[in-house]
């Protein structure tokens, strides 16, 4: 008499696509976010928070990947905010002129 076969292994939880996207946008933000106004880093932060919430209970895998994307997003955004505030505090007149010039160019491009 043979023993009964072992039960099949449990299926691994599906990986979170948002966690992978957060990591990709975090890397993009770190490498080239300065030329895209920090948009990839902001997207990485948003996706990283959603992915961390999604993977926290173990229903999906990829928690570490989502947290890595989140950290990379913050690593790129926080210094940019500090520099932005410092430049505004040191050179308020030049900064206001730069914003007015940029907005004027943007409006003339749209029209």
Image (tube, grey):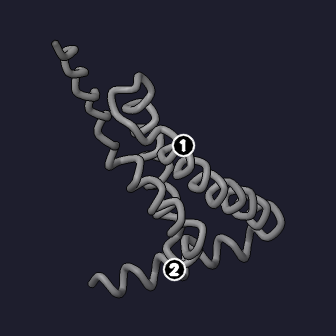
Nearer mark to the viewer, of 2 and 1: 1
- Residue nearest the observer in this picture, 72 or 100: 72
Q: Describe residue 43's horizontal placement relative to residue 87 as left or right.
A: left
CA neighbours of label 1 inside 10 A, class few (<14), some (14 to 19), many (20+) = many
Q: Which mark is residue 67?
A: 1
66 vs 78: above or below: above
For label 2, count other residues whose C-alpha is less than 10 Å away and answer few (under 14), some (14-19) or many (20+). few
Q: On the image, numbered disc 2 is attached to which residue?
A: 102
Label 1: element kind: helix
From this view, report whether residue 49 is shown above or below residue 106.
above
Q: Classify 74 as above or below 109.
A: above
> Residue 17 placed where, x, y %?
32, 49
**Residues at marks 2 and 1, CA–CA distance in whole angstroms:** 35 Å
* Quarter residue 105 falls in: bottom left
- Quarter holding the C terminus is bottom left
From the viewer's side, name the closer residue of 6 and 2. 2
Q: Outermost residue toward the front?
A: 1
The one of 97 and 35 positioned closer to us in this rendering: 35
User: Vertical placement of 4 versus 81: above or below?
Assistant: above
* Residue at the spot 46% in from the left edge and 62% down from the top edge: 25
Nearest the camera: 81 or 109? 81
- In this view, the residue farthest toward the right is 90
Give the image location of residue 50, x and y in percent: 40, 38
Q: Residue at x 60, y 55 (%)?
A: 72
The mark total stands at 2
Disc 2 is placed on an element classified as helix
């Amino acid at each position: 008499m043979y023993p009964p076969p072992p039960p099949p292994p449990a299926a691994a939880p599906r990986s979170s696509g948002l966690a992978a996207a957060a990591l990709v946008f975090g890397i993009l933000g770190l490498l080239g976010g300065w030329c895209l106004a920090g948009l990839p880093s902001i997207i990485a932060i948003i996706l990283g928070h959603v992915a961390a919430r999604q993977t926290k209970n173990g229903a999906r895998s990829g928690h570490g990947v989502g947290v890595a994307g989140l950290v990379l997003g913050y690593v790129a955004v926080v210094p940019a905010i500090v520099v932005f505030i410092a430049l505004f505090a040191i050179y308020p007149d030049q900064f206001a002129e730069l914003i007015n010039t940029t907005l004027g160019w943007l409006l003339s491009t749209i029209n």
